Amino acid sequence: GDSVTQMEGPVTLSEEAFLTINCTYTATGYPSLFWYVQYPGEGLQLLLKATKADDKGSNKGFEATYRKETTSFHLEKGSVQVSDSAVYFCALSEDNFNKFYFGSGTKLNVKP
Amino acid sequence: DAGVIQSPRHEVTEMGQEVTLRCKPISGHDYLFWYRQTMMRGLELLIYFNNNVPIDDSGMPEDRFSAKMPNASFSTLKIQPSEPRDSAVYFCASSWGTEPPTEYFGPGTRLTVL
């Protein structure tokens, strides 16, 4: 069945450090891939998405590239800020389906 | 649009009581999802609807949980009787059947069962 695996946290970085959060997936078809972010006390918000192999999703300085050969969708940001502290979820959705599969979430703490 | 609306935002109840959580999806969305989030189990999909019809309820933990969607603008998740292990944050999300679908989450209801 479909599933998403992401690195365990928490990840603690200093401001302006480089961020990578690893995400790999298992899917039977050709999924769309997503990163969601959850700030404290709030619901999940879509951060970025990619719909096919080699697509790059980007938003707010975050990027992730859909790598079919390695079944990965790693989240990166060149210079994190304190305001990026949140929990990040990787997710997939199969074509023509609206059911999402979420990873377990990775908590990011950014220190000034 | 106001986004997905959930009520109440916080609920504290005693074991054995009935709890009803409410959700209003974004207008025009034809999919609605209920999730539960806990520290131990992370984010779990409980049930989802398409055009008000339940499609997959395999995530509903047991018969104490039930969900309804009487119309396109309203859904409820009911727990009867509630137990302390039901304490969690319950999220409602909605989407529409475009490619790719994108789920929009509500702010959640934090449930505490004493």
Image (cartoon, coloured by chain):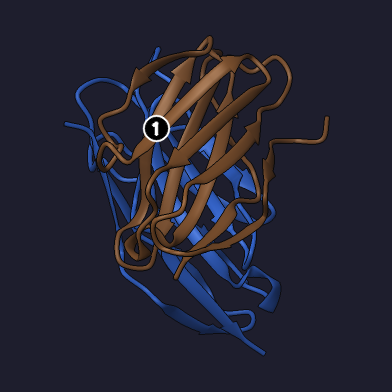
Q: What is the crowding at mark 1: few (fewer than 14 residues within 10 Å), some, or many (at least 20)?
A: some
Chain A, which colour?
blue
> Could you tell me if residue A101 is visible in this image?
no
Residue under numbered circle 1: B66
The residue tagged with tag 1: helix, strand or loop?
strand
Q: Amino acid at mark 1?
A: Ser
Question: What x and y, as percent, mark residue B63?
Answer: 27, 36
> Could you tell me if residue A56 is visible in this image?
yes
- Which quadrant of the figure has residue B2? top right
User: Which residue is depicted at the point 67% across and 90% down?
Assistant: A112
Chain B, which colour?
brown
User: Which residue is depicted at the point 53% across and 9% down?
Assistant: B51
Location of residue A20 with respect to B94 vertically, above or below: below
Q: Among all residues in the image, which is located at the extreme right? A: B1
Location of residue B34 with respect to B110 vertically, above or below: above
User: Which residue is depicted at the point 58% across and 24% down?
Assistant: B95
